[in-house]
Every structure is written in C-alpha cells, then in structure tokens.
Image (spheres, rainbow, N blue to C red):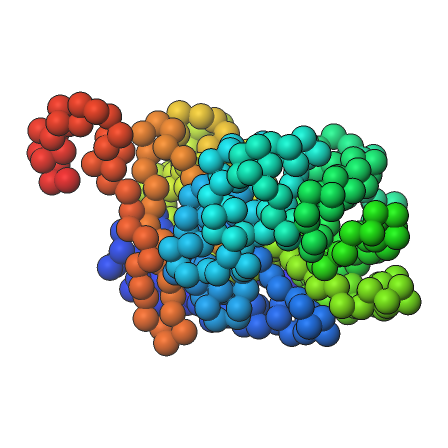
Amino acid sequence: MDKKPFVSAEKLREIAQQYPTPFYLYDEKGILENADRVKRAFSWNPGFREYFAVKATPNPYIVKMLTDGFGFGTDCSSLTELMLSKAIGVPGDHIMFSSNDTPAEEFAYAAKLGATINLDDFTHIQFLEDTIGYIPETICCRFNPGGLFKVSNDIMDNPGDSKYGMTEEQLFEAFRILKGKGAKNFGIHAFLASNTVTDDYYPMLAEILFKLAVRLEKETGADIKFINLSGGVGIPYRPDQTPNDIFKIGEGVHQVFNKVLMPEGMGDIAIYTEMGRYMLGPYGALVTKAIHEKHIYKEYIGVDACAVNLIRPAMYGAYHHITVMGKEDAPCDHKYDVTGSLCENNDKFAIDRMLPKIDMGDLLFIHDAGAHGFSMGYNYNGKLRSSELLLCRDGSVKMIRRAETPRDYFATFDYTHIFDGVLEELGY
Ligand SMILES: *Cc1c(COP(=O)(O)O)cnc(C)c1O
C-alpha cells in the first residue's frame, strides 16, 4: 500500500509560497477523526480516558484539540509539560504525571495542580512525602516485570533492561506503604514496548496488569480504581506495514477485562491510555525543499531541513516515507541519499531510497512526523527550529508556532547585546 500525503501537491505549493520551508504541517481533519475512533474504541469502559503524551507534540493548539474536543487529559513528565497543560485549561484530574528520575520541584508542581502522580520507583514514595509533606489520596505506581516482553514469540522489547518502573515485589510493598500513609485510590501503569504494530500489544499488556490488579487488591487491600496502559501503540512508518486497528485493540482489551476483572467484581476499573505516537504520528509531516544535488560516489539530494528538525532517522535509523510532491505517479527509478546540512554524516532522511527524479525546488513530504518529530528537535550547528502549521478542516492554514530566528538562538546569553549589530544587519 503506498502512502498518500494528506495534502495535494498544488495546495502544498500554495502553502510553501506563503510560509518558507522547512515547516511541519499537521492535518486537523486526520487528528480529529482518529481521536474520535480512539474514543469510540474504548467507549465500552465508562471511565476510559486517553491522556495524550504531551512530549510527542507539545503544541498547545494541538493538545487543546484533544483535551477540549474529546475530554482527553494530558500525560506529562516535566515541569513545562505540566505548565502547558495548566495554561490550556486542563483540570488537575485530567493530568497524569508519569515522570521518572523526577526533580522535587516537579513533584511539588504536579501535586499543586492536583495531577495524578505515577511513581516510577519505590524510593519515590519517601521522596514525594518529604517533598510535599503528604501522600495524595490518588496515586499510581509504574510496574516493570523484567525479562523480555514477547507477543507470539516475537520479542517486542526488553523491560529487564529498561530503567522504568518497580519490580513486582516492590509494587506490592509500595501499595501497602501508600495505603498506610492514607492513599485511597490506586492505579497501576506499565509501558513494556514502543511503537508496536500489532493489535495484540494492549490486550497482552492488559492481561498482565489486570491479573496483577486482582492479586494486589487481594493481598494489600488497596482499592484499584484505574489501570493505565500507557503508550506504545505504533504506526506503520513503512508502506508495507499493516496499520493497527484501534477497534480491534479496544475490543481485545474489553475481552480480557471481561475474562479477568469482571469475575472478581472489579468491573468498575477505569482504563487509561497515554498514547502519543498513535494520536499524532501520521497526521504531521515535515515539508522540505530540494536545494542541492550532488553526484560523487553516490547520488545526494540536499534539502533545507536537517536532523535538528527530525532526528528519528539519524538517532534510530528510523524509516520515514518520502513523497516527492507532484511526482506521486512517476516511477521510482532514481536511488538517492536525502541529506540535511549538518556536519554529521548521519544527517540523512533517507539512504539508498528509490524515488522519482528530484529537481531543485521540488517539495518533499516526509511522512509520519507528527509525533516525536518537532518535539525532539535541537539546535546543533546553530540550526533553528522550523515553524508548525495546521492545515484546518476548511482548507485554510494557520501558523501554530513561528520558526525560531537567530535572535531566539542568541537570547540566553547574558551579553545578548553584542549580537544586536549582526542581527539588525540581517533584519532580525
Ligand atoms: C513516551 C511516553 C508515552 C507515549 O508513548 P507513544 O509511544 O508515543 O505512544 C506514554 N507514556 C509515557 C510514560 C511515556 O514516556
């Protein structure tokens, strides 16, 4: 199945005439339709809530589409993500604070907002109490079962090697201690595999957590109110991958719920999710222009974006599909490395990729950059972050974040004035 951009070549050319490349473009229609599917897929559970993982796409316009539009919450793990949630009006009980290695001031702010604190470690019980002076009535603990996590013999991930969560023994002890310190409403959370492109991940994780919940209630007397399946639901970055079916995933969790929790009289437990990638990944693209071609031992196309705008290919060797706009139906008979301008040889959006012949000025649509794309940006080589644009349902385009300028780049020096001359000379 070929991947189709959510915008036509003609429309994108029009947008690029008004807003200089590179930029991120998000598809409002796609975001809203997907969020609606997520909501319906879990509607069998009256307490269901998706807490959107802010780190995936920390743009207030986008987060607000999900929180205001669907009653979703936010999943935060830093001070600024909490601040963003507060600023756009997310109520405390709609904020999940799933942090790790947490600074004291962040626990304090999360508690002040009334966010649900998800403790990553056993020692954080004492740390939290020392920091805020009490244990909140609603509290969650993150579980790490260790070992390898497999779905039908395929190794999905390696929890035993991951820094997150508590061992089973610690979790039981944590619940006893928290209960003794006044906690009343308990939750459990686990994130065991990332970017899973299978409908089985959530149901398998749910089965582990539901069975654990039954034992935890029996053995500690803690009242478990919610189970947080966290993130990890993936998207098909490659055109040959089969997309997840969120309705099958929701129904799979439902069946395990009926099998494990209902017979125990635990049918009032709420299911929470903290999806980031699945909520936004396919509905954002990095749009960049071809500005150089280079013919040495290989064929290179140089574009005006680089790894600071989208680091996933450089960092993980991740595949991002590329459409050369206006050449959707042309034969892919040229083999290119598509590169950015960093002085880093891994600054490549594609390696040995078969694409149509690229001409200078062509617009390249780099797919599936809507989550963990812009937000993983950085400033190496003094490169600047791009703008973010929203393609609205009515076809209009709204700039939802302007591009960084050199003035932003120099702004944190305390002798900023020495840059005034060069900035003014270039019109910044
Ligand atoms: C990153 C993260 C998420 C979101 O993960 P996705 O793979 O984007 O769905 C959810 N919860 C926690 C605690 C995370 O760290």
Q: Nearer the viewer, residue 200 or 266?
A: 266
Pinpoint residue 371: horizontal percent, then vertical percent. Answer: 52, 51
Picture quarter with the C terminus? top left
Picture quarter with the N terminus? bottom right
User: Who's the residue at 71% across and 71% down the image?
Assistant: 45
Is residue 136 visible to us here?
Answer: yes
Q: Nearer the viewer, residue 267 or 60?
A: 267
Q: Residue furthest bottom?
A: 394
Pinpoint residue 405: horizontal percent, then vertical percent. Answer: 24, 40
User: Who's the residue at 35% across and 67% down the image?
Assistant: 11
- Quarter assignment of residue 281: bottom right
Pinpoint residue 55: horizontal percent, then vertical percent. Answer: 50, 47
User: Who's the residue at 73% across and 67% down the image?
Assistant: 250
Is residue 340 depicted above or below 413 in this figure? Answer: below
Q: Nearer the viewer, residue 310 or 158?
A: 158
Pinpoint residue 34: horizontal percent, then vertical percent. Answer: 57, 68
Tell whether 145 sits left or right of 135.
right
- Quarter assignment of residue 244: bottom right
User: Who's the residue at 89% across and 64% down the image?
Assistant: 264
Is residue 392 depicted above or below 105 in this figure? Answer: below
Is residue 362 visible to us here?
Answer: no
Tell whether 396 sits left or right of 233.
left
Tell whether 241 sits left or right of 314.
right
